[in-house]
Image: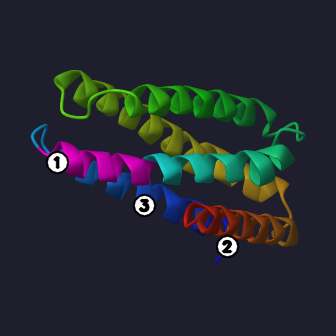
Amino acid sequence: MNLYEMLHQDHEKVKSLFDQLEAAGEDQERRREQLFSALYRELDVHSQAEEKFFYSQLKGEEETRELTLESLDEHKLVKRLLDELESMDKGTPEWTAKCRTLRENVDQHVETEEQELFPLAQKTLEDEEAAGIAEDIESFKEEHTELEAY
């Protein structure tokens, strides 16, 4: 699987978790906690891997620098929202509203990344380089998933 397909799969997994979260009502607080925990882990590991291996390559390139820096800022906002949501009561309308804000931010980020950054990255990165990044991200994700199992 190539780099862009792999990142897209991560995006689809996050979308599915958001869909499940939205389907869980405020009276299903335990379910929301489980789903949110999975969403938090997924977004955290995905963004760390993207920043460490993908963005680090792209921010040094003229064609991709601006979009990459914007993406890094978006990751910071998502992380802040995740941390705020984590400390809130999952069964409240306030939590529901903030989670919707998080989803809107993530959806916008994914759209920009897939529609604008990926095509520029494909022109900027050699196929071998992209394959190496994909391998690094895969290893990083496996390592962090194993660490969570303990």
Are dots 3 and 2 in contact, CB under 8 Å? Answer: no
Work out which residue is located at the far left of the displayed protein and give it. 27
* Residue at screen point 40% across, 28% down: 87
Q: Position of residue 64 (x, y in %)?
A: 78, 40
Q: Camera-side residue: 107 or 146?
A: 146
Count residues near mark 2 (Cα–Cα under 10 Å), then give few for <14, some for 14-19, many for 20+.
some
Look at the image and tell me in which quarter the C terminus lies: bottom right
The local crowd at label 1, few if under 14, some if 14 to 19, many if 20 or more residues have their Cα within 10 Å, is: some
Q: Foreground residue, 137 or 86?
A: 86
Eye-nearest disc, 3 or 1: 1
Q: Which of the two discs, 3 and 2, sits closer to the camera?
A: 3
Residue 69: % across, % down: 74, 30
14 up-or-down from 22: above or below: below
User: With 121 as the anchor, is 27 left or right in this view?
Assistant: left
> Which residue does the numbered mark 2 point to in the structure image?
2
The segment highlighted magenta reads: 28-39
11 falls in the magenta region: no
Q: Give the residue at x 18% y 33%.
A: 91
Q: How is the image coloured?
A: rainbow
Q: Whole-Å distance between the Cαs marked 1 and 2?
A: 34 Å
Residue 97 in the image: above or below residue 46: above
Instruction: Quadrant for the N terminus, please.
Output: bottom right
Locate residue 108 relative to residue 134 in the image: left or right.
left
Q: Nearer the viewer, residue 67 or 55?
A: 55
Residue type marked 2:
Asn
Q: Residue furthest bottom?
A: 1
Amino acid under disc 3: Lys
Dominant SS of magenta comes to helix
Say if mark 3 contacts mark 1, CB within 8 Å. no
Residue at the spot of label 1: 24
Residue that mark 3 sits on = 13
